[in-house]
Image (cartoon, grey):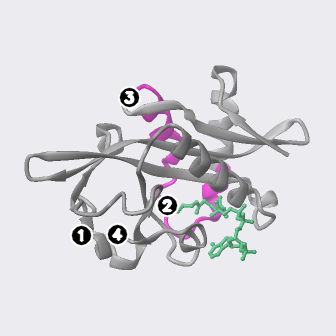
């Protein structure tokens, strides 16, 4: 299994992988593949942070991080939003999600980003160092259970003095 950047030729296959993966998800609108289509066309898209896991000559997983902002009155602090993360049902629970997460975190650091926000399962993301965003005074722009909204500092103390409401790509709300 390898993790690599998503290429134009992968788009259709990746969309199918996302749609299939979310069929097993606890919380889903089953529209995550369409969200990715919109995000790829948005200003917040970072091609280096759209990654695929490839094995048995096919794509079995995908992760996407896009640019977002933490808005604190008139200050805007750059962050990344992780969404979605997908692994085909028959390949789940075998470490592929973990490998995609670790690679995405490593590349985000290399690209100079300072934090990542995620709305997700409170048992899954803390494995990678995510903590409740509310601990840092960082809030989602929508109603969400406190424990499901999390943030990861990519550099120690990157979030010191940072608080506010996250502003996502408009593509999330179209
Ligand atoms: C969530 C998802 C991406 C995880 O990928 P995965 O490849 O199955 O996960 P991994 O095998 O890498 O698991 C990593 C760890 O998380 C645990 N884990 C996996 N799924 C979990 C879940 N739903 N809840 C809690 N822990 C979970 C594993 O046991 C493993 O723990 P360990 O490192 O202590 O052994 C995958 O199950 C998926 O695509 N689900 C459907 C779509 C979805 O819900 N996406 C996430 C939206 S927030």
Q: Is mark 2 within 8 Å of ligand 1?
A: yes
Residue name at image x 8 percent, y 46 percent: 74
Q: Position of residue 81 (x, y in %)?
A: 42, 50
Mark 2 vs mark 1: which is more N-terminal? 2
- The quarter of the picture where the C terminus appears is top left
Q: Which mark is residue 42?
A: 3
Ligand 1 rendered quadrant? bottom right
Mark 4: secondary structure: helix
Q: Which mark is residue 90?
A: none
Q: Nearer the viewer, mark 3 or mark 1?
A: 1
Q: Which residues are magenta?
A: 20-42
Looking at this view, is 30 or 75 the one in front?
75
Left or right: residue 99 compared with residue 123: right
* In the image, residue 168 above or below residue 45: below
- Furthest residue to the front? 156
Q: Which mark is residue 137?
A: 1
Q: Mark 2 — residue? A: 28
Q: Position of residue 4 (x, y in %)?
A: 72, 35
């Amino acid at each position: 299994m390898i993790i690599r950047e998503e290429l134009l030729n992968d788009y259709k296959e990746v969309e199918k992988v996302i749609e299939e993966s979310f069929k097993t998800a606890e919380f889903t609108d089953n529209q995550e593949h369409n969200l990715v289509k919109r995000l790829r066309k948005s200003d917040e898209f970072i091609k280096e942070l759209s990654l695929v896991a490839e094995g048995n000559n096919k794509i079995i997983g995908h992760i996407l991080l896009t640019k977002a902002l933490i808005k604190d009155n008139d200050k805007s602090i750059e962050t990344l939003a992780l969404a979605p993360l997908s692994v085909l049902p028959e390949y789940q629970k075998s470490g592929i999600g973990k490998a995609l997460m670790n690679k995405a975190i490593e590349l985000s650091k290399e690209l100079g980003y300072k934090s990542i926000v995620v709305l997700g399962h409170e048992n899954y993301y803390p494995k990678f160092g995510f903590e409740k965003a509310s601990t840092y005074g960082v809030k989602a722009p929508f109603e969400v259970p406190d424990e499901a909204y999390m943030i990861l500092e990519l550099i120690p103390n990157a979030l010191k003095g940072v608080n506010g409401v996250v502003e996502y790509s408009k593509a999330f709300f179209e």
